[in-house]
Amino acid sequence: MELKTKLSVLADAAKYDASCASSGSKRERPKGGIGNTEGMGICHSYTPDGRCISLLKLLLTNVCIWDCSYCVNRRSSNVRRARFKPEEVVRLTIDFYKRNYIEGLFLSSGIIQNADYTMEQLVLVAKKLREEENFGGYIHLKAVPGASEVLLKQAGKYADRLSANIEMPVQEDLDKLAPEKTIGEIEDTMGTLRAEIDESRERARADKKSARPAGAGETFAGAGQSTQLVVGASRSSDSVILKKAEELYKKFKLRRVYYSAFSPAEFTSPELSRTPTPPMREHRLYEADWLIRHYGFSASEITAQIADGNLDLTKDPKLAWALAHRQLFPVDVNRASRSLLLRVPGIGVRNVDRIVKIRRFHRIGLADLVRLKVSMNRAKWFVVTADHNPDVFNLDKTDLMTRFRRPAEQLSLFAPGPATVVMGEI
Ligand code: SF4
């Protein structure tokens, strides 16, 4: 098969893996080499459904001996198969990098022969890029669950980020949909990576303390590890998914958990639902995940007020929580604790910190919040300022729905958005 054809088959096959954001790495350009992950080295670019497009995102092969029913590449699927040689991936990465098409490589694979053989092939690509091509750009490798510790250690030596995809929140789902996988084995892999990352950070701290130059190649997966959960292929609710994500953050200090809305494709198992998971469900999970990581919410707090275990698709989870806890509002921005301010819809972490600083010098009014670019259409119903006191209890349900509904129309890039909500300001 021609390289171009392989590329079209294997780039297409990789699009279902969402765990590829490239943040958090600090690898400098090697002497006489090319590529780095600093500053402009990595551009973050996302498709509207949250997938990263700035990396060359490939599968080494879409041949797989396992049979996960939600996956187009499973053993029993009729999809067209292809396989790269490691040196072909190296050539493509370097050629594309030099043409400025990409900032790095995201490489995953179907399971060839067994976990160790697959991991070995992935490591070989990264090793060639680093040692033969002197490539300093970003590399994200898939950590194959069940691969030996030796291979995982090598992977972390060359890659900036590793990800072992857990895919399902409970073993029961895996038993039904991915019978070769076990949560235990996947978490063992995550545990090995965690231990190596911690050790490498410890070494770096010791080097810094003793003013020793940090040894080249000693960093283990500098951008940490991540994972992916497929949403909507099983019956597990958002509540179960978020609890699992929270547990993984705590246990393995993952940098990110990615959520991938299941979309039935021609070759996914016919037993699975033919209705695609609404992208809004994925979006709400990302918002809830953000609340857990940056706003001090727990998964159970976010999901306590939802009846069927799934997040409300019509309003973001922070707003839903605030409306269910109206007795706590309005919050006085001039007196409330940081943790309470973080719970106000429309005020993001950065603005909470600014508010805490500014109020030392003068009493904050509505104009101050406008200047800080707080999302006023939400926040003003939940805050007391020096010159404003809303009547949150007298907002009836219909009124609330009208006030907080997102605009349905597509805005132009330069139009002033009446209710634009970005991550970080939820
Ligand atoms: S292991 Fe499962 S999810 Fe991964 S490529 Fe094979 S069938 Fe697809």
Image: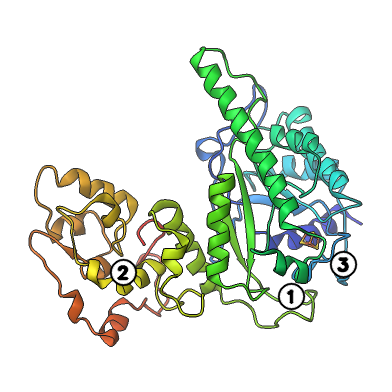
Relative height, residue 9 to residue 32 (above, below): below
* Pair 2/1: label in front: 2
* Pair 3/2: label in front: 2
Element at badge 3? loop
Mark 1 or mark 3, earlier in chain = 3
* Residue placed most toward the observer, 299 or 375: 299
Element at badge 2? helix
Which coloring applies here?
rainbow
* Pair 1/3: label in front: 1
Q: Which mark is residue 265?
A: 1
Q: Quadrant of ligand 1?
A: bottom right
| Dot 3 amino acid type | Arg
The residue where tag 3 is placed is 80
| Dot 2 amino acid type | Ala
Left or right: 322 as drawn, with respect to 282? left
On-image quarter of the N terminus: bottom right
| Dot 1 amino acid type | Ala
How far apart in space, not on screen, are marks 1 and 3 (Cα)?
A: 14 Å
Mark 1 in CB contact with mark 3 (< 8 angstroms): no
* Residue placed most toward the observer, 423 or 93: 423
Left or right: 384 as drawn, with respect to 232? left
Mark 3 in CB contact with mark 2 (< 8 angstroms): no
Q: Which mark is residue 104?
A: none
Mark 3 or mark 2, earlier in chain = 3
Q: Position of residue 195 (x, y in %)?
A: 64, 36
Q: Position of residue 177 (x, y in %)?
A: 76, 70
Relative height, residue 198 to residue 306 (above, below): above
Q: Residue furthest bottom?
A: 398
Q: Position of residue 47 (x, y in %)?
A: 56, 62
The residue where tag 2 is placed is 322
How far apart in space, not on screen, are marks 2 and 1 (Cα)?
A: 38 Å
